[in-house]
């Protein structure tokens, strides 16, 4: 049911910010996160994004990494993939695989808008510790 061909292709992450009511903005992964989101004609999508300042493992080998190194690496990284569909002003990512197991079998829903060669994705506000917060991601067409 993917009907909006503007999604198709590869997009590079430009900005990831969280805004709370009152437009307080913070950058949970710093001001230079890295990532890509891809949408293909078969109706599948994949996203991987991370903080660009994650420390390398001392052993330089994933299985030999310490528990602390693995936690630090995963703490500022997310990925998921599955089918997607665009309806109205929302895109539904139907998650089949994910670093975060709780998302598997669920939908990640994002509001979307296109501005020239950029894709703007945002979450609806979710309750936070003190105020409602929403995530905003800007992607540049590659």
Image: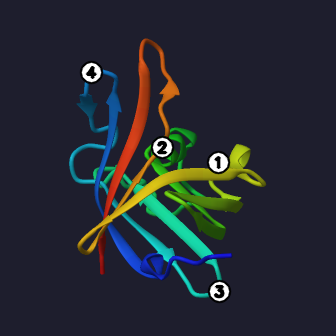
Q: Is residue 76 left or right of residue 110?
A: left
Q: CA distance from mark 2 to mark 3?
A: 24 Å
Front-most of residues 35 and 5: 5
Task: Find disc 3 in the rendering and name its residue.
Answer: 42
Q: Earlier in the sequence, mark 2 or mark 3?
A: 3
Screen quadrant of the N terminus: bottom right
Residue at 69%, 48% (x, y): give it.
103
Screen quadrant of the C terminus: bottom left
- Residue 100: assigned label: 1
Q: Nearer the viewer, mark 1 or mark 3?
A: 3
Q: Secondary structure at mark 2?
A: loop
Q: Is residue 19 left or right of residue 73?
A: left
Q: Is residue 67 left or right of residue 54?
A: right
Q: Are marks 2 and 3 in contact (CB under 8 Å)?
A: no
Q: Earlier in the sequence, mark 3 or mark 4?
A: 4
Residue at 48%, 43% (x, y): give it.
123
Q: CA distance from mark 1 to mark 4?
A: 30 Å
Task: Find disc 2 in the rendering and name its residue.
Answer: 123
């Amino acid at each position: 049911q993917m009907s909006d061909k503007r999604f198709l292709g590869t997009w590079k992450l430009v900005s990831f910010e969280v805004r709370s009511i009152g437009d307080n903005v913070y950058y949970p992964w710093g001001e230079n996160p890295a990532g890509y989101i891809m949408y293909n004609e078969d109706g599948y999508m994949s996203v991987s994004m991370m903080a660009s300042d994650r420390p390398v493992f001392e052993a330089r080998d994933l299985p030999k990494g310490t528990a602390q190194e693995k936690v630090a690496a995963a703490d500022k990284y997310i990925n998921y993939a599955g089918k997607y569909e665009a309806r109205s002003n929302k895109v539904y990512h139907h998650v089949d695989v994910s670093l975060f197991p709780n998302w598997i079998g669920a939908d990640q829903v994002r509001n979307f808008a296109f501005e020239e060669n950029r894709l703007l994705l945002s979450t609806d506000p979710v309750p936070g510790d003190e105020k409602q917060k929403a995530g905003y991601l800007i992607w540049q067409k590659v």
